[in-house]
Amino acid sequence: GNGYEGSLGIGYLDGLRLGWSARHLLGARDTLRLGNDALPFHLETDVFGGGSAILAQGASIQRRRGRTTLQAFAGASANAVAAPYFASNTPSRAMAYARAQYDVRRNLSLVGHAVATRRQTFLGTVRWVPASGVTTSATAGIGSDAPYAATSIDARTARLDVKAVYAALGSGFRRAAAPMPLQSELERENILVTWRALPTLTLSAGRQHFRQDSAFRGL
């Protein structure tokens, strides 16, 4: 109550395990979180879905001021220990995380992700909505010290949808050098076209390329 929310779990799985988290609303626009956490890592160029989360344990704060939203975390990356009815995170390595978004105009936003740990991540994105139903984005930077660049378009009309991404990944790219659910990253050209020919008939055609991060050496 009064802006506070928390959870506590105790279990036994190859030893005694403790899992806990707490959240406190700071005024009407800010949130403080403590304990186990999953930090979202979604890029604006993820038009086919995707994205992931960094498992962590520590303290984070999210603030909103005018056109700016900021989330900052300090603590440690973590390995998850999951079992029915219970989950806990075991600290792995010191880590800091930040995500910032600034809405330049209603149809133009700048977004940045940064992760500081054993290998560094700095990714910046520009998102532009030039017309109703059309969203374009471009991302560039490094992930786990490897270069990354992507551009995307998501266009939707009453009968036709087009999603396309072109991505270039450096060797060993990963969104963060921290425990994350295994994920596939799009690379090279990717497109999906959906045509609603009739109210009862929808046709789709696409081409996609994936790279699985579990195949990268040293992760």
Image (cartoon, rainbow, N blue to C red):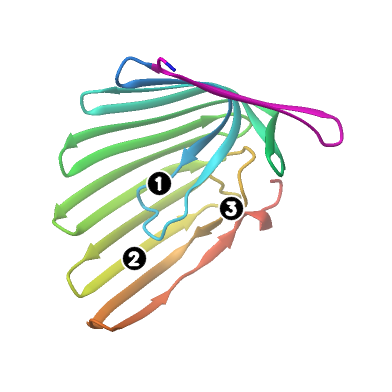
Query: Relative to residue 33, is residue 101 depicted above or below?
Result: below
* Distance between the alpha carbons at the discs numbered 2 and 1: 14 Å
Element type at marker 1? loop
Q: Could you tell me if the residues under marks 3 and 2 are in contact, i.e. CB atoms within 8 Å?
A: no
Q: Is residue 131 above or below residue 24?
A: below
To which residue does mark 3 refer? 171
Question: How dense is the environment of label 3, judged by Cα within 10 Å: few (below 14), some, or many (20 and up)?
Answer: few
Observer able to see residue 119? yes
* Left or right of residue 197: residue 214: right
User: Residue 137's x, y, as percent?
Assistant: 29, 51
Q: Is residue 181 above or below residue 120?
A: below
Main secondary structure along the magenta-highlighted residues = strand
The residue stretch that appears in magenta: 2-25
Labels 3 and 1 touching (C-beta < 8 A): no
Q: How many marks?
A: 3
Local packing at callout 1 (Cα closer than 10 Å; few below 14, some 14-19, many 20+) is many
Q: Secondary structure at mark 2?
A: strand
**Which residue corresponds to mark 2?**
164
Q: Which residue is mark 1?
A: 43
User: Which residue appears farthest toward the right when viewing the image?
Assistant: 14
Residue 173, given in percent of the width and then of the height, sits at 56, 48
Question: Residue at position x 62%, y 37% from top?
Answer: 178
Q: Nearer the viewer, mark 3 or mark 1?
A: 1
Residue at mark 3 to residue at mark 1: CA–CA distance: 19 Å
